[in-house]
Each structure stands twice: as structure tokens, then as C-alpha cells.
Image (tube, helix red, strand yellow):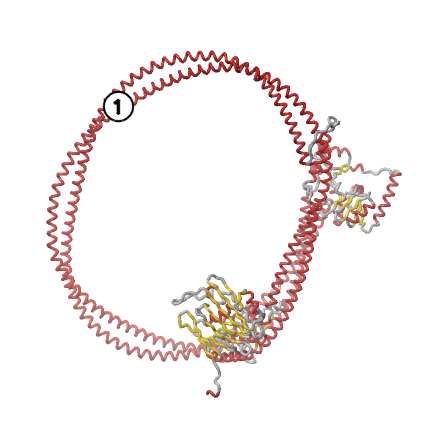
């Protein structure tokens, strides 16, 4: 099997589609740095499924797509295909040729193809798993991987061994099995939780079903009672309803008679009301006329006042207008004078302007001639300056050159002196180094002896420390147990104290009597607090004593009566009591003796039952004074092992009760109470005694804890005295000293060789510097001669330039004065223009103001004329309105007299009508009284109808029955109150039962079936858990055996190949960490070339590391060869001799493995049978050139 073809398109620098055909044997890939050689290796990695972007030398996966150049656009996708010849069937597929393809698009989407069919990454990974060709296998090795394989991080190294051993599929199966095991455990936990909940539900539904049965029985009795009561109440209410109807009919007749009298009086009142209405209309009309006259009077008075105000305003305006006209005429005269003065001044300014323009024009021609002459002189000056600048530049260059030559000559002289001093220093240092090496060798021998002694001491102290640590761990475990037990006891004591102090579980009445001292000052107790039992029998006795546990123990009837009176007076409910004086021995009659004999016979038979555990009274622990009362209560109750036996014994001996250890009980009256065990905190029997026992037990455990703490402290003190750290630190220091000594010796030897090389280099450099100094002296002489000639030329030019500068400055000053004089004239011209413009603007504004004043005078004269006209008109209007006011006042007095006459007539008629209304009101009151009586009887009838409807609806809703009117002989003698009480009592019983689930039995059956199903599921999960654990153990055994066998073979091969690459006397080994799972154990590599003893493999040189890694790689190939191997510049650190060994090994293995080598080394290139060159003719785009080498037949030479 081998890699036959690689197709690259758009991957990194391979923009164009590139096909690379590979042959068996060794193929070399060469080219300059940066041409894209390693991109071929990255392409193979990538198509095999590599997901790490760092391995592909990128920060994100989309960056592998060709990103474009100045000439080429970026591509939208990248594709690589790899074809392998599967002639040996190494890959698990039926195809003899397998092509895998990977594509990636700019959008981030990826595709994988297997023989041009879409597949998953997982399919590619599984195809190459344990073949040595995966992304994490040893088929692709680059230079940085050498460091990784040989580094202190063992994960990368172990992956190579796992790939060679073929255990990856087992580790994958183990990982999947462990995940399944975790899932199964999680499912089991979840199922157990569900089972626990469903079991609670089943128990609850079982109790609900019993309650539903009890509910149905009570409901049946209630129906009969309530129907009998409702039918009689229905008949009785109908009888009352008929009586009320007769009373209502009589009252309605009386009401009709009163209505006739009311109608007669109402007709008389209608006539009177018509007369009153007519007179009221007439009176209202008169009042309206008076109101209108009054309004007219007020309006006239108001108009007169307004006109008088307006008249005063007009008089005031007349004075104001006359004053304003006088002021405006004065302003007009002043404005006319200002206009005349400014027009005269404007003529004078225009004459001065023309004179100034003429003067400026005559001077312009003289300025132009002077400017032309100035420009000619400035051009001549510029030419002189340019010639002088060029000469100065040449002088500066030559001076700089001379200074540089002098500096360089001085530098060479100083360097020669330094080099001579350096040679002397190096010679002295070499002499000292030889002495240091001898001293260090002596120190090394002493340190190695100390290291051996320190190792022995550490072994002895480690053994002693391990024994003490085991003892300490044991003591700490006991301490934790004691602390947990003490914490549990403390919680129980606190909990029991809370229950007792709060009287939890005690009935309300008993709780009140126990807490209050008002009714009795004596100590008070109940049955629950004066007895106790062993934990095993506590539930049994709790059930047997359940009816009396809350009973308050009283000594006599007086105390009993006191307690009862206290509860009644305070309305505190009821309590149960146990009268101690009642339980006294009395003389037995003959019948009593016969009964006792029969009872004893039954007792003996019960005691013979196999499940009989004892009589309940015998298990009670109580003070002597209380014991007889427990015996009395429990005299006929036996404790048996289970409920089934209890029922069987009760069937044979119905006079006895039987209780079980789980608290189930069947009493002598046949009452059974059974189900789940009550919680510990739900029991009240023996609660006080249990608290006392726990309090006694607590100090013992505290003492045990203190004792354990003392032992722990003593052991820890002994452990702290064993200072292993100092011993190990001392050993490490000694080992470090030895390593440092070896390192120093090696360093000193290296420095001596380096010093010899430095002396040779310094002597050679001194000779070169002396030759350079001679050449520089000659060059300096030539430069100084040229510099003297240039200085003479500079002096001549400086003299000519000085004379010309003096003449130019005098002419330039004269021209400046001429320009200044002309600028002064131009400024004067602009000033005159400004004065003319200002004067013209002022004249224009004054003329506008004159027009405005004339318009103002004209307007005010017009307003004055209108004001005089309006004043005369207003005076005439006021006189006319005063005349109208007198006329209106006379008419109003006549209207007021007519109003008083009509009002008197209206009052007389209203008095007569009032007498009729009083009579009408008396009749209406009588009618209302009759109507109220009718309404009262109708309400009573409605109430009876409502009660009838309520009874009918209640019976209909509750019993689905329609009531019929029947005749009952006992209708008036029936005891309604007693029957109602019975019905109420039955309803209270139903209420006390609480919410009843009538579907409980069907739900119970359904949940019971579900519970059985869950039990089966749980059993299946437990079996699955066992099977998975067994499978994981088998996988571990198989994988460990494979790994160990492969490791041992690789180890032997590694030692052999290492000695081949180095020398037969060189040492190398692979060491597997002991007492650890081989699949997780660290693999250490040791390599010690002859003459070296490195403490770590990381101290080897780059070439030695490469050869060591190569030895390991080929050791793996001997056990499980990879069909192909790609080596990316791994020969870079090797010298020529080691490259020859390396290539020799490649040729040996090329018969079984195809090698593809990226290299710069010529000797490695020579070993290649096929060579590809990678170039970059176009910037950023890689191109491939192929060459194949063949042997030349002898007859061709």
C-alpha cells in the first residue's frame, strides 16, 4: 500500500490545480525558503482530517483558501484529494484504490468525500484509525515534532505507541462504554427517584380508596335522611304558602275602595290647578315687562357714561396734535439748512480728488524704469551666489571625506590595540580554565558519594513516614465518624427538645392542660411521656397505645372535674383523660374466675404461635407506679412478626388485638390500621425517655472524640518531625551540584576550544586592519591637496561678491524710498474718495428725512380736523339719551303697580286648593299602609317560594330527584330539629374525611401497574450496568495486553536502532511508569551517547535529538509500519556524517514504507528516487517541477 496521487486546488499558495504523482520508495520535495514546500505537507495533513488550525500554521480554517495576489483574485474554495493504493487491504474497505477529498468554502462550510461520495469526518477518521496514517499518527513528522516527542509532556509520545499498538479503537470503545455507564447510572438514579415517588403515590392512593369507600357508605345514609326531611319541609312550606295567598286577597279589596275616594278629590284639585296656572302666567308676563324696562333703563345710563368718556378723550387729542405740528415744522427748517451746507462741501472735495489722480499718474513711469534696473542687478547677484555655493559644497565634501578617513584610521589603530589585548586576555583565561577543570572533577567524585548516602536515608525515612501516614488516616477516619455521630446526636437531641417543648403530636385539649397551671399546680403527665420501649418495639407499642397516648393522667374525680370545667369555661375544646384511681384491684366473682381461665387458655395458644414475639405490656419500660396502667391498657394485645399472622390470629382469637414491629395493628373490634412505617419524629411514645438516653450517650462520644484528637495530634507531631523535604531537597541539591559540575566541565572545555578559535580570528583581523590603514593614509594625502586649491578659489569669489553686494544695497534703498512716496499719494487718494461717498450719503438721508417730516405735518393737520367734527356730534347724542331716560322710568312705575294686584289674587286661590290636598294625603297614607301589608305578605310568600326552590334545587343537584307534593300524617309531629342534626352530623363526617378521590381505586390500579413496570426497568438497568462494567474490564485487559506487547517490541527495536545510528557502546532505553494503568502511564526516553551523561534528554544537542526521535520512529515502523511517511525538514540539525546514517536508514526501510521528504540537504536529495521542485515564478503562487532518477545501464556508459 502506498500514497499514489495528491491533487491540490486553491490550497494556500497553490492557486492553480496541481497534480503530484508519488512512486514507491523515497520522494524528495525541494525548493527555496518561502516557496510553499511545507504547504504540500499541510495539504496531506488537512485532507486526512486535521482540525487544529495551529498545526496548519493558521489562525482560522478559512485561511487555507488561496487569498489572492496582486495579479490573481482570492478563491472562494479550496480542495485537496489524496489517492492511496490499497493493494494490501490495510484500510477496512473493499476498494483497491481509495480517494479521499476535502473541500472548504469561504462561508465556513466543509465537505468530505470518499471515492467521490459525500461522507462525514468521522468516516475518514475511522478509516485510518490504528493504521498509522491518521492526523495524530506517526505518518507525518516535522522538525518541531521532534521536540514534542522528546519533551517532558508524555501525551504526544504515548499517542504514537497507542497508534502502533492499535488500541485507539479499544480506548474509543472504552470511552463510549464509560459514557453509556454514566448514562445508565444517571437513568438508574432517575428511575429510583421515580420509583420512590410512585411508591408514595401508590400508598397514598390505597389510603384514598379506603376513604372513598367510607365516603360512599356515609353518603348513602345521608341521602335517605336528607330526602325524608326535604319532602316534609316541601309539603309544610306549600301549606304556609296557601294561607298567605288568602290574606293578600283581602288586603287588595280594601286598597281598591281607597283608590275610588282618592280619584274624586284629585278631579277637584285639577280645576284649582288650572286657575292657578292661568294667573301665574299673567303674573310672569308682567314681571317680564318690568325686567325689560329695567334693562332698557340701565343700558341708556351705560351709553351716556361711555359717550362722556369718549368726549374727554377727543379734547385731550386735540391739544396733543397741535403740539406735535409745531415741533415738526421746527425740525423741517433745520434739515433744509444741513442739506445746503453739505452740497457746497461736496464740490470742493471733487476738485481735490482730480488733482491727486494727476500727481500719481506722473510718478508711475519713473517707478517702472527703476524696477527693471533692480531686476537686472538681482539676477547678477543670484549667479554670484550659485557659483559660491557650489564651491562651498565641494570644500565641505572634501573636508568631510578627510575627517572620515582620519576617524577610520584612528578606529583601525584602536581595534588593533584591542585585539592584541584580547589575545593576551584569552591566553590568560585558557590557563585558568585548565585548573578549574581539574578542581571540578575532584568535586564531582565527592558529590557522587554524598548522593548515594542521601538516597539511603530518604528510603528509610519514607518507610517510617508511610507507616505514620496510614495510622493518621485511620485515626482521622475514626474522628470523622465520631464527629458525624456527635452531630447526628446533637441534631436528634435538639429536635426532640423542640418536639417536647412545643408538645408536637399532642391533641389540642391535652396540650392546653399540660401548658397551663391555672387549673392544677401538680406535675401533669400523659401516657406518651411516662413509658418507653426498645427501638425495635417502639412502632408496635405506638400503634397499640394510639388511643390513649394523649390521655392526661389524673389521680381522682376532683382533679378530672377541675380540668373539664377549665376547658369549658375557657372554651378550649375537649381532652381525653385516664383516671388512675379507677384502676384498683377488686375481689373476683366466680364468673370472673371462669372468664380468666378461658382467657389464660387462649393466651397460651397465642404464645405457641411461631410469629409470636411477646405481650405488648412486657415490652413497656416504665416506673413502678405507671407499669400497672400500661398492663391494664395492653393486657390483650400481642406483638407478632407480620400483619398476615396478626389477621390469622385475630380470626381465631377475636377478643385479642395484635400489632407488628412495623406498627400495623388489628384491634379486638376488628379495626385494622396498616401501611408504611411512620417517621421517627412522628412517634410520641417514649419521646422523653429517648431524649434522656441520648443526653447520657452524648458525653461518652465527646470523650472518644477528644481521645482521638490527642492521638491525631501526637501522630501529626511525629510526622512533622520527619523532614523528608530537607532530605529530598538535599538529594536534589547534590544531584543538581553534580549536573552543574558536569555542565561546568563541558562548558569550560567548550570555552577553551572557542578561545583558541577567537585567538586565530583576532590575529587574522589585525593583519587585515593594518593593510586597510596604509590605503587610507594615501587617500587622505590626495584629499588635502584638492582642499587647498578649492580654498584659494573661494577667497577670490568672496571679494567680488562683497563689492557687488554694497552697490546693490544702495540702489535697492533708493527704489524703496520712491515706492513709499507713491504709496502715500495713493492712500491720500482713497481718503478723499471716502469723504466724497460719506457726504453724498448724508445728503441723501437728509432729503429722505425732510420728506418724512412734511408727510407727518400733513397727517396730523388732517387728524385735527376729524377730531373737531367728532366732538360736536358726540355732544348732541348725549343730550338725546338723557331725554329717553326720563320716559323709560315713568313706564316702569305703572308696571310695578299692576304686578302687586295679580299676586294677591293668586294667594287666595292657592289657600283653597291646600285644604283639598291635605284630605288627599290622608287617603294616600291609608292606601300605603294597606300596600305595605300586601308587600310584607308577598315577601313572606317569596321567602317560602325561595325555600321551596332551594329545597327542590338542592335535592335535584345532590340526588338527581324531583320533589313531589305528598300528604304526610306526621307533618306537624315530625322531629325536624333532630333530623337536621343527624344530617349535619353526617355532613361533618364527610367534611372530616377531607377531599375524597372517588376515582382512587382505578388510579391505584393504574399506578400499581406503573410501579411494577418501573421495578422491571430498574432491574434491566442494573443488569445493563453489570454488563457494561464487565465489557469495560474486558476492553481494558485486551488493550493493556496489546499495548504492553507492542511497547516491549518497540523498546527492543529502539535500543538496537539507536546503537546503529550512534555507537554500539551508547545507551538508550524506553521506561514505562510502574504501578499505573499502562494505557495512562508515562513513557520516559533515556539516551546517553558515549562520553555524555545528560540528566535529561532535553540536554541533548539538536542533531542528537533528531537521531533519537528517528530511532524511535523506525522502531515503531518495525512493529507496525505506516504505508507512507512524510518527513518535513527533520534532517536540518544533522551534520554530514549523521545525514549519511539517516539516509542509509531511510533506504533500508523504503522497501516496506513510502517516504516523502521535504529537505534542503544535498545528501538527502541524493538518496531520493523521485524529486519535485517547488518554485514561485509568479509572486505568491507555488508551481511544481518534477524529476525522476534512474540507474544508467552499464552499456550506456
For the residue pair 946 and 612, the one nearer the viewer reads as: 946
For the residue pair 883 and 359, the one nearer the viewer reads as: 883
* Residue picked out by circle 1: 312
**Image position of 438 with respect to 120: above or below:** below
Residue 855 lies in quadrant: top left
Quadrant into which the N terminus falls? bottom right
| Farthest residue, direction right | 590
Helix, strand or loop at label 1? It is: helix
For the residue pair 851 and 658, the one nearer the viewer reads as: 851
Q: Find residue 1154 and report its horizontal and vertical position in percent.
A: 53, 76
Please indicate, yes or no, whether residue 1041 appears anywhere in the rendered image. Answer: yes
Q: Find residue 68 and report its horizontal and vertical position in percent.
A: 41, 66
Picture residue at 67% right of the left edge, 64% below the top = 1030
Going by the image, does 341 lie left or right of 489? left
Q: Find residue 651 and report its horizontal and vertical position in percent.
A: 81, 45
Picture residue at 85% right of the left edge, 48% below the top = 605
**Image position of 597 with respect to 1024: above or below:** above
Going by the image, does 765 lie left or right of 940? left
Picture residue at 77% right of the left edge, 50% below the top = 642
Residue 841 lies in quadrant: top left
Q: Find residue 1024 and report its horizontal and vertical position in percent.
A: 66, 60
Amino acid at each position: 500500500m502506498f500514497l499514489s496521487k495528491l491533487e491540490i486546488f486553491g490550497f494556500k499558495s497553490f492557486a492553480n490545480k496541481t497534480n503530484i504523482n508519488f512512486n514507491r520508495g523515497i520522494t524528495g520535495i525541494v525548493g527555496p525558503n518561502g516557496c510553499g514546500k511545507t504547504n504540500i505537507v499541510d495539504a496531506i495533513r488537512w485532507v486526512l482530517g486535521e482540525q487544529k488550525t495551529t498545526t496548519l500554521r493558521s489562525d482560522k480554517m478559512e485561511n487555507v483558501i488561496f487569498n489572492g495576489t496582486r495579479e490573481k483574485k482570492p478563491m472562494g474554495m479550496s480542495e485537496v484529494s489524496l489517492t492511496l493504493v490499497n493493494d494490501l487491504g490495510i484500510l477496512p474497505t473493499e476498494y483497491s484504490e481509495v480517494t479521499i477529498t476535502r473541500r472548504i468554502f469561504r462561508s465556513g462550510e466543509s465537505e468530505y468525500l470518499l471515492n467521490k461520495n459525500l461522507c462525514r469526518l468521522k468516516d475518514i477518521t475511522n478509516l485510518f484509525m490504528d493504521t498509522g496514517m491518521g492526523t495524530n499518527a506517526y505518518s507525518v513528522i516535522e522538525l518541531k515534532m521532534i521536540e514534542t516527542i522528546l519533551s517532558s509532556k508524555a501525551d504526544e509520545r504515548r499517542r504514537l505507541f497507542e497508534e502502533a499498538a492499535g488500541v485507539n479503537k479499544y480506548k474509543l470503545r472504552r470511552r463510549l462504554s464509560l459514557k453509556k455507564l454514566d448514562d445508565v447510572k444517571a437513568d438508574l438514579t432517575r428511575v429510583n427517584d421515580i420509583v420512590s415517588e410512585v411508591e408514595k403515590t401508590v400508598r397514598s392512593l390505597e389510603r384514598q380508596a379506603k376513604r372513598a369507600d367510607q365516603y360512599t357508605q356515609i353518603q348513602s345514609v345521608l341521602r335517605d335522611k336528607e330526602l325524608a326531611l326535604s319532602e316534609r319541609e316541601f309539603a309544610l312550606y306549600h301549606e304556609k304558602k296557601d294561607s298567605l295567598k288568602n290574606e293578600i286577597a283581602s288586603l287588595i279589596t280594601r286598597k281598591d275602595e281607597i283608590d275610588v275616594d282618592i280619584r274624586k278629590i284629585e278631579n277637584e284639585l285639577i280645576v284649582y290647578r288650572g286657575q292657578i296656572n292661568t294667573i301665574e302666567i299673567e303674573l310672569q308676563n308682567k314681571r317680564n315687562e318690568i325686567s325689560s324696562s329695567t334693562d332698557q333703563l340701565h343700558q341708556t345710563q351705560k351709553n351716556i357714561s361711555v359717550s362722556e368718556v369718549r368726549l374727554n378723550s377727543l379734547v385731550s387729542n386735540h391739544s396733543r396734535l397741535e403740539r406735535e405740528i409745531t415741533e415738526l415744522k421746527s425740525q423741517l427748517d433745520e434739515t433744509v439748512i444741513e442739506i445746503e451746507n453739505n452740497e457746497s462741501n461736496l464740490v470742493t472735495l471733487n476738485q481735490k480728488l482730480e488733482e491727486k489722480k494727476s500727481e500719481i499718474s506722473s510718478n508711475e513711469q519713473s517707478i517702472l524704469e527703476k524696477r527693471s534696473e533692480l531686476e537686472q542687478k538681482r539676477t547678477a547677484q543670484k549667479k554670484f551666489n550659485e557659483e559660491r555655493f557650489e564651491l562651498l559644497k565641494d570644500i565641505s565634501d572634501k573636508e568631510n571625506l578627510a575627517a572620515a578617513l582620519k576617524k577610520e584610521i584612528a578606529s583601525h589603530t584602536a581595534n588593533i590595540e584591542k585585539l592584541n589585548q584580547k589575545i593576551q586576555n584569552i591566553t590568560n583565561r585558557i590557563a585558568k580554565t585548565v585548573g578549574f577543570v581539574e578542581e571540578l572533577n575532584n568535586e564531582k567524585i565527592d558529590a557522587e558519594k554524598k548522593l548515594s548516602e542521601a538516597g539511603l536515608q530518604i528510603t528509610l525515612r519514607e518507610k517510617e513516614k508511610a507507616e505514620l501516614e496510614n495510622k493518621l488516616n485511620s485515626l482521622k477516619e475514626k474522628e470523622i465518624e465520631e464527629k458525624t455521630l456527635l452531630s447526628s446526636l446533637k441534631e436528634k437531641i435538639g429536635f426532640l427538645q423542640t418536639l417536647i417543648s412545643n408538645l408536637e403530636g399532642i391533641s389540642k385539649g391535652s396540650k392546653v392542660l399540660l401548658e397551663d397551671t391555672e387549673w392544677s399546680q401538680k406535675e401533669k403527665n400523659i401516657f406518651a411521656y411516662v413509658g418507653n420501649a426498645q427501638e425495635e418495639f417502639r412502632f408496635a407499642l405506638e400503634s397499640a397505645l394510639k388511643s390513649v397516648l394523649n390521655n392526661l393522667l389524673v389521680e381522682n374525680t376532683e382533679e378530672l372535674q377541675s380540668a373539664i370545667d377549665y376547658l369549658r369555661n375557657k372554651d378550649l375544646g375537649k381532652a381525653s383523660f385516664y383516671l388512675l384511681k379507677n384502676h384498683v384491684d377488686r375481689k373476683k366473682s366466680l364468673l370472673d374466675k371462669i372468664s380468666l381461665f378461658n382467657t389464660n387458655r387462649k393466651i397460651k395458644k397465642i404464645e405457641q404461635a411461631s410469629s409470636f414475639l411477646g405481650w405488648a405490656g412486657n415490652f413497656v419500660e416504665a416506673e413502678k407506679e405507671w407499669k400497672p396502667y400500661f398492663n391494664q391498657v395492653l393486657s390483650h394485645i400481642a406483638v407478632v412478626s407480620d400483619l398476615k399472622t396478626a389477621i390469622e390470629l385475630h380470626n381465631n382469637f377475636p377478643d385479642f388485638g395484635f400489632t407488628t414491629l412495623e406498627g400495623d395493628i388489628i384491634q379486638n373490634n376488628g379495626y385494622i390500621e396498616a401501611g408504611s412505617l411512620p417517621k421517627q419524629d412522628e412517634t410520641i411514645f417514649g419521646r422523653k425517655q429517648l431524649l434522656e438516653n441520648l443526653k447520657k450517650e452524648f458525653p461518652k462520644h465527646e470523650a472518644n472524640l477528644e481521645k482521638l484528637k490527642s492521638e491525631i495530634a501526637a501522630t501529626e507531631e511525629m510526622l512533622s518531625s520527619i523532614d523528608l523535604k530537607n532530605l529530598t531537597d538535599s538529594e536534589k541539591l547534590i544531584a543538581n551540584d553534580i549536573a552543574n559540575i558536569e555542565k561546568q566541565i563541558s562548558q569550560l572545555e567548550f570555552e577553551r576550544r572557542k578561545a583558541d578559535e577567537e585567538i586565530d580570528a583576532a590575529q587574522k583581523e589585525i593583519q587585515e586592519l593594518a593593510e586597510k590603514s596604509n590605503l587610507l593614509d594615501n587617500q587622505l594625502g590626495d584629499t588635502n591637496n584638492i582642499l587647498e586649491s578649492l580654498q584659494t578659489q573661494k577667497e577670490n569669489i568672496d571679494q567680488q561678491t562683497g563689492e557687488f553686494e554694497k552697490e546693490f544695497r544702495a540702489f535697492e534703498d533708493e527704489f524703496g524710498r520712491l515706492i513709499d512716496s507713491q504709496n502715500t499719494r495713493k492712500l491720500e487718494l482713497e481718503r478723499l474718495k471716502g469723504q466724497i461717498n460719506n457726504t453724498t450719503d448724508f445728503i441723501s438721508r437728509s432729503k429722505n428725512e425732510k420728506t418724512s417730516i412734511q408727510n407727518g405735518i400733513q397727517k396730523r393737520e388732517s387728524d385735527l380736523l376729524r377730531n373737531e367734527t367728532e366732538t360736536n356730534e358726540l355732544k348732541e347724542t348725549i343730550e338725546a339719551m338723557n331725554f329717553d331716560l326720563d320716559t323709560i322710568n315713568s313706564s316702569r312705575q305703572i308696571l310695578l303697580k299692576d304686578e302687586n294686584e295679580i299676586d294677591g289674587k293668586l294667594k287666595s286661590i292657592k289657600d283653597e286648593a291646600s285644604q283639598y290636598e291635605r284630605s288627599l294625603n290622608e287617603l294616600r297614607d291609608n292606601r300605603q299602609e294597606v300596600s305595605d301589608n300586601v308587600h310584607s305578605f308577598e315577601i313572606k310568600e317569596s321567602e317560602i317560594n325561595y325555600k321551596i326552590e332551594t329545597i327542590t334545587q338542592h335535592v335535584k343537584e345532590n340526588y338527581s330527584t324531583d320533589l313531589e307534593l305528598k300528604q304526610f300524617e306526621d307533618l306537624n309531629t315530625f322531629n325536624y330539629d333532630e333530623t337536621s342534626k343527624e344530617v349535619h352530623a353526617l355532613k361533618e363526617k364527610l367534611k372530616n374525611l377531607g377531599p375524597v378521590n372517588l376515582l382512587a381505586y382505578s388510579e391505584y390500579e393504574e399506578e400499581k401497574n406503573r410501579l411494577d413496570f418501573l421495578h422491571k426497568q430498574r432491574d434491566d438497568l442494573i443488569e445493563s450496568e453489570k454488563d457494561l462494567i464487565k465489557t469495560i474490564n474486558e476492553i481494558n485487559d485486551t488493550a493493556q495486553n496489546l499495548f504492553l506487547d507492542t511497547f516491549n517490541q518497540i523498546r527492543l527495536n529502539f535500543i538496537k536502532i539507536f546503537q546503529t545510528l550512534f555507537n554500539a557502546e551508547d545507551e538508550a532505553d524506553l521506561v514505562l511508569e510502574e504501578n499505573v494503568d499502562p494505557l495512562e502511564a508515562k513513557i520516559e526516553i533515556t539516551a546517553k551517547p558515549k562520553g555524555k551523561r545528560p540528566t535529561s534528554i532535553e540536554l541533548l544537542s539538536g542533531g542528537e535529538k533528531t537521531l533519537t526521535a528517528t530511532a524511535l520512529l523506525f522502531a515503531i515502523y518495525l512493529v507496525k509500519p505506516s504505508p507512507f511517511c512524510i518527513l518535513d525538514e527533520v534532517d536540518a540539525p544533522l551534520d554530514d556524517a549523521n545525514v549519511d546514517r539517516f539516509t542509509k536508514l531511510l533506504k533500508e526501510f523504503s522497501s516496506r514504507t513510502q517516504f516523502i521528504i521535504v529537505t534542503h540537504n544535498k545528501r538527502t536529495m541524493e538518496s531520493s528516487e523521485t524529486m519535485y521542485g517547488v518554485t514561485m515564478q509568479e509572486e505568491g503562487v507555488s508551481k511544481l517541477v518534477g524529476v525522476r532518477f534512474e540507474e544508467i545501464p552499464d552499456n550506456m556508459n
